Image: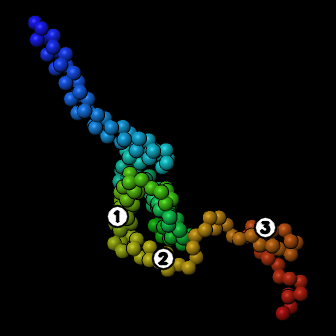
Amino acid sequence: MKRLRIYVPLVVVIGSVGGYFAWRPSYLRRQEAKRERAAEERYFGASYRDRDGRKEAEADIDRGRPKYKEHGNHAGQTIQWRAILRVRFGIEAEAIADCVVSKALVDYADAYNATIETYIAEKYGRDAFRAAREEAKCSPQPYQKGANQPPLQTPASGTPTAGAPVAPPSGAAGR
């Protein structure tokens, strides 16, 4: 009986310590993964982890509103690229992130865009998307924020207006 009083607590203590060390690393990994997910959602807005880009692209195509998802520091870089997509293919370019992106967002955008590119290839020809991209690259006018509007011009009255035609100076009309 005396031995039982010694061995039972000893076995319980050894089992508890062993269980603690076996459980602790996995617990720490789970906590770290949870912190990373929370940081991703905090820094990148809505989470793209559970979104299926292919299914969303197919749904947008069925609705007749396909988009091209852009991310990175070149997202929506040229007006010409957006115009080519809209006029030639009926697709709107949508910048979903700037330079800082998550792996989930990139995977989502790649799956979405691959489906859209397949749709373009089936409808307009295999090289249509590549040719449009090359045409936009050769275009000289870079996109700048606010470039969708014409620059401010000052008419003869001296009041700046957006896109208003500028009257020539009074002495330059007859030259």
The image quadrant where one finds the N terminus is: top left
Q: Nearer the viewer, mark 2 or mark 1?
A: 2
Residue 108 seen in the current view: no
Report the front residue among 9 and 43: 9
Residue 89 seen in the current view: yes
Q: Position of residue 51 (x, y in %)?
A: 38, 47
Chain-order first, disc 2 or disc 1: 1
- Residue designated by label 1: 118
**Rendering quarter of residue 152:** bottom right
For numbered disc 1, what is the local secondary structure? helix
For numbered disc 2, what is the local secondary structure? helix
Amino acid at dot 1? Thr
Mark 3 neighbour density, 10 Å: few (under 14) some (14–19) many (20 or more): some
Mark 1 neighbour density, 10 Å: few (under 14) some (14–19) many (20 or more): some
Q: Could you tell whether 146 is left or right of 23 in the image?
A: right
CA separation in Å, label 3 and label 1: 44 Å
> How many labels sit on residues?
3
- Residue designated by label 2: 137
Q: Name which residue lies at 53% across and 78% down.
A: 139
Q: Could you tell whether 166 is left or right of 15 in the image?
A: right
- Residue designated by label 3: 161
Chain-order first, disc 3 or disc 1: 1
Mark 2 neighbour density, 10 Å: few (under 14) some (14–19) many (20 or more): some
CA separation in Å, label 3 and label 2: 31 Å
Q: Position of residue 35 (x, y in %)?
A: 41, 41
CA separation in Å, label 2 and label 1: 21 Å
For numbered disc 3, what is the local secondary structure? strand
Chain-order first, disc 3 or disc 2: 2
Residue 63 vertical placement versus 21 (above, below)? below
Residue 26 vertical placement versus 80 (above, below)? above
Q: Could you tell whether 3 is left or right of 50 in the image?
A: left
Report the front residue among 140 and 7: 7
